Amino acid sequence: MTRFGELLRTLAAAGVEFIVVGGVAAAAHGSPRSTQDVDVVYSRSRQNLRKLVDALAPHHPYLRGAPPGLPFRFDVETLWAGLNFTLVTGLGWLDLLGEIVGGGRYEDLLPHSITVTAFAIDCRVLDLETLIRTKRLAGRPKDLEAIAELESLRDRPER
Amino acid sequence: MPVAGGCLFTGALPLAGAGHAGRIMKGGVKGEFMNSVDEIIERYKRDVDLTLIDAALRRTVEERIQALEAFERFREELRAATERRRDALR
């Protein structure tokens, strides 16, 4: 089971530069749709990779769905060599995304994020308009229902 | 935004009153066509439960994320209970 708040607090406490995207971002904006993992776009700077490793290593990140026993090392070099990682950790499922379709990298998304305070931390969340736009640009059929919900949410007078 | 392949058959999503309903599919299946992603999204919007959205909007961000965790716990408990029951019946 994913401990959403604890995962976010762990990253924020370590000073990791990240933006929450995906289902948790949608939930933060008010979507009632459920999700099972935390998706974040992270800064690819070497310094940030080091912070990511330091923050997550105690929670034993491993490739989600991979057979046990693979020689996977969660270190700066591995992160540098890759881009997007779907992980299982002691705190739950975490997707580390170096970039997202239609949105780009951390630096591209930063102007399109907002800061929210929750679980005694400030963290950046992709803004609703950009969340909708990136889902539209991703072009995945499975997102169409979620887009309808997010656009309905955007248009609610209570927002 | 066009759908790859030109159109999407939505046999499970009847489009009564959508202006292009009632086309007959090959094999006698009565269905409808939607020619763009926008049309599909607009169709889905009809079924969005706005009461759930409004309830979520009344919560804080933290409460919204806690609701995700609560549902995850519920799902896990339900899964475990189902497995226990299945084992008991073996």
Image (cartoon, grey):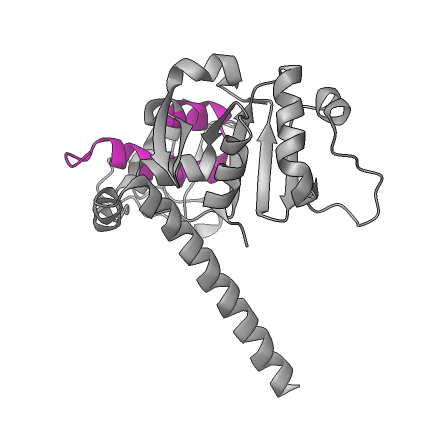
Name the residue nearer the viewer: B41 or A112.
Answer: A112
| Count of marks overlaid on the render | 0
Q: Residue B38 at x, y = what percent?
A: 34, 28
Name the residue nearer the viewer: B12 or B83.
Answer: B83
Would residue A54 be found to the left or right of residue A124 on screen?
right
Residue B23 is a magenta residue: no
Looking at this view, name the residue that lies furthest to the bottom: B89
Residue A154 is a magenta residue: yes
Name the residue nearer the viewer: B85 or B36.
Answer: B85
Name the residue nearer the viewer: B30 or B82.
Answer: B82
Q: Residue A155 at x, y = what percent?
A: 21, 31
Q: Residue A96 at x, y = what percent?
A: 60, 31
Q: Name the residue rendered at 74%, 29% in the picture.
A: A75
**Which quarter of the image is occupied by the C terminus of chain A?**
top left
A150 vs A137: above or below: below
On the question of residue A150 being in view, the answer is yes
**Which quarter of the image is occupied by the N terminus of chain A?**
bottom right
Q: Name the residue rendered at 64%, 17% in the picture.
A: A47
Would residue A33 be found to the left or right of residue B86 on screen?
left
Q: Quadrant of residue A150?
A: top left
- Range of residues picked out in magenta: A131-159
Would residue A126 be found to the left or right of residue B46 on screen?
right
On the question of residue B36 being in view, the answer is no
A46 vs B82: above or below: above
B25 vs A135: above or below: below
State whether the magenta stretch is mostly helix, strand or loop.
Answer: helix
Q: Name the residue rendered at 19%, 35% in the picture.
A: A156
Q: Name the residue rendered at 64%, 37% in the picture.
A: A56
